[in-house]
Amino acid sequence: MKLLEGKTAVVTGGARGIGKAIALKLASQGANIAITDLALDDKSKAVEAELASYGIKAKAYASNAAHYEDTKKVIAEIAREFEKIDILVNNAGITKDGALKRMTEEQWDMVIAVNLKSVFNFTQAVQPYMWKQGAGSIINMSSVVGVSGNANQANYAASKAGIIGFTKSVAKEMGTRNIRVNAIAPGFIETEMTAALPEEVRKGWNEKIPLRRAGTVEDVANVALFLSADLSSYVSGQVINVCGGMNT
């Protein structure tokens, strides 16, 4: 039997990168998958089809994760169509990097809204469904930057550090209903975004990593699978660094 047979998972930002890898990994283990993205485009529909190829129910939804009412509506729609929500992966995120002295208010507000407020929006929206079931697993995507900070990423670091504080607090609130809340803090992961970095920057990152390589989206997805499944039934309120030993 597959690890997530009969479960339903919601993955925000699930049409690309780490979110897509997580959605595919959970689908491969039997979970029905709802992915959200800012718009329903060819990419999100292609991921929907790829997910469905695992023989599970899959659907892509358009949703602005930073918008409170929009989130409530899309979660209600998912709960109606899938009949339950067992797993939530809060993965939606953006970067608007720059030195603090040149950072605009818009750059700050946008990153906080998409990265941090979205986690509040979706977690609060799924809470009634998980509360009624008496079970659930919520996985919030933080970053090693949220643990240790990084120059020229004050907005991103603040949003990802906020996710850690949120995760630990909500785990204490929801634990009595057997709802587990954990965070994953990826390090330098090979994605479309990091592939665009200059080769010398990528080489510099690799030299800082004890395992001497960048991580893959599969590395992150494997940890998300562990946290989604009953394998981690006594793990809650934790931050798991997936960074090749960079943050120890």
Image: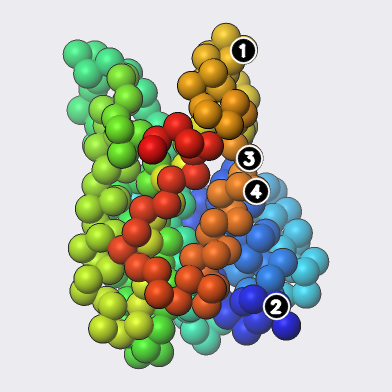
Can you identify the residue that label 2 sits on? 2
Q: Earlier in the sequence, mark 4 or mark 1?
A: 1
Quadrant where the C terminus sits is top left
- Left or right of 131: which side holds 8? right
Left of 41 or right of it: where is 83?
left
Q: Earlier in the sequence, mark 2 or mark 1?
A: 2
CB atoms of marks 3 and 4 within 8 Å: yes
CA distance for labels 3 and 2: 23 Å
Q: Categorize mark 4 by other alpha carbons within 10 Å: few (<14), some (14-19), many (20+).
A: some
Q: Which residue is mark 4?
A: 218
**Mark positioned earlier in the residue sequence (3 or 2):** 2
For this orientation, the residue located farthest to the top is 200
Q: Earlier in the sequence, mark 1 or mark 3?
A: 1
Name the one closer to the observer, 142 or 210. Answer: 210
Q: Residues within 10 Å of mark 1 (few under 14, many from 20)?
A: few
| Pointer 4 with pointer 1, Cβ within 8 A | no
Image height of 69 relative to 151, above or below: below
Q: Quadrant of the N terminus?
A: bottom right
Q: Quadrant of residue 4?
A: bottom right
Where residue 195 sits: x, y (%)?
Answer: 62, 25
- Residue 65 horizontal/vertical position (percent): 39, 54
Q: Nearer the viewer, residue 32 or 62?
A: 32
Label 3 sits on residue: 216
SS type, badge 1: helix
Please, what is the three-letter code of the amino acid marked with disc 1? Glu
Q: Nearer the viewer, residue 196 or 40?
A: 196
Mark 2–mark 1 Cα distance, whole angstroms, equals: 40 Å
Please say whether residue 100 is visible from this viewpoint.
yes
Which amino acid, by three-letter code, is at mark 2?
Answer: Lys
Residue appearing at x 40%, y 84% in the figure: 135
The answer to whether marks 3 and 2 mark residues whose Cβ atoms lie closer than 8 Å is no
